[in-house]
Image (tube, rainbow, N blue to C red):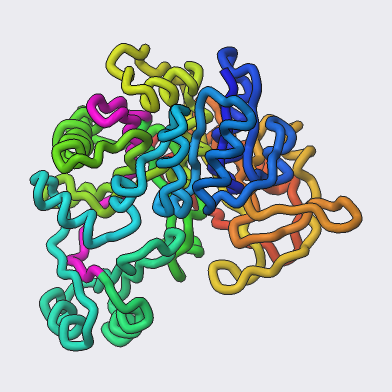
Amino acid sequence: MKVLVIGTGGREHALARALSTDPAVTALYCAPGNPGIAEVAELRPVDAMDPAAVRDLAVELGVDLVVVGPEAPLVAGVADPVREAGIPVFGPSKAAALLEGSKAFSKEVMAAAGIPTAKSYVCQTEDEYVKALDEFAGFPYVVKDDALAAGKGVVVTEDRDAALAHARACGRVVIEEYLDGPEISLFGVTDGITVVPMMPSQDFKRIGDGDTGPNTGGMGAYCPLLWAPAGLTEEVVATVIQPLVDELRRRGTPFAGLVYAGLALTAKGLRVVEFNARFGDPETQSVLAMLASPLSELLLPAATGTLAAAPAPRWRDGASVTVVLAAAGYPGTPRAGDVITGVEAAERLGTAVNQAGTNRNADGDLVTSGGRVLAVTAVADGLAAARAKAYQGLAAIGIAGAQHRTDIAEKAAETAA
């Protein structure tokens, strides 16, 4: 089959990498892509936010499947005209993608479906901000931008003034109770009826070691979660993802694609932190590295409504760890144009380097062009070995002023030892 991947980031590089080794994939395109993706797929220039342009490209190429990676094109409705043209799409419609496009809508759907989540208020005036913050006084304040914010629209702080300032800056926000306990990510592939879970993972949102500093789009991830309670995946599917899929179908907006469930294992039980309408980044890099069966065996059935008949995914033994290398200035204003060296050396060490914020300068050098520049993923027999291998690969890469966390999967590896 011919496949077109839409997007430019590390998630799309990981998807393209997996599809490039899939025996069912005979031609692989990516639009607009990045220099790393260009090594495994044919790049085509297109505005990923232009639904008509994406449709026209898919028709021109005669592809059998379009995979939409990022949230912004999905929320913009890129999947809809492609489906209308008769081409299967892995990614929800504009109406269903509102699950990620609006935190308020997501909370409304959860309430209707009886999905466990944090108590919350949708606020857009000063009086509403103050009342909600007073309601949750005594715990860290959680304030979420209602709209898309590239994974950085959430503030969790004990500083009431900082929480109020974030609400004012965003306008319409969701202010909710703080959820204690470890957080996990679980991807559910769905065709709008059937849900097939992938391997649970954990990511690290804050910029600094020990979960310090501001939130980012994600600084690293690992899987599997050896410390997670038995039956967790089945519980999440039964009480969270399947009810969500059923509720969206009941509303006439069936969801076909990837449901990302961000979850907290609290003292009161499982709670949903957030839903996303696409693969998470950088969890995708770790999860797909552990997938032993062809990725198309999940994506195409989800796009064509035949997931119930698809073979169950198979997983490798061992563990994977992903560490993100970010540009100087991230998550504020990242510096662009710094030369990147050592990517090939890192891959010769057996790691996968998925590029995100990269470009080529006039001299042909690989340079930084975004906040999270690349992610180094390693697979090994156990977490400690995978972690050591990932950091070894990272050490081979040079970027002036770059930053990364040194504690990705550290506690989990110590527990597993």
User: Looking at the rendering, which quadrant does residue 168 occupy?
Assistant: bottom left
- Residue 390 rendering spot, x and y as whole percentages: 61, 40
Where 213 sits versus 262, above or below? below
Region in magenta:
174-198
- Residue 104 rendering spot, x and y as whole percentages: 22, 62
Q: Which residue appears at 23% of the width and 78% of the height? A: 124
Looking at the image, residue 4 sits to the left or right of residue 251; the answer is right
Q: Quadrant of the C terminus?
A: top left
Q: Total marks drawn? A: 0
For residue 375: magenta?
no
Where 3 sits versus 389, above or below? above
Looking at the image, residue 182 sits to the left or right of residue 403; the answer is left
- Residue 196 rendering spot, x and y as whole percentages: 30, 25
Q: Which residue appears at 49% of the width and 23% of the height? A: 295
Visible residue check, residue 225: no
- Residue 255 rendering spot, x and y as whole percentages: 29, 37
Q: Nearer the viewer, residue 63 or 374?
A: 63
Q: Nearer the viewer, residue 213 or 302?
A: 302
User: Looking at the rendering, which quadrant does residue 120 occupy?
Assistant: bottom left
Q: Nearer the viewer, residue 363 or 181?
A: 363
Q: Nearer the viewer, residue 312 or 407?
A: 312
Q: Which residue appears at 35% of the width and 71% of the height? A: 155
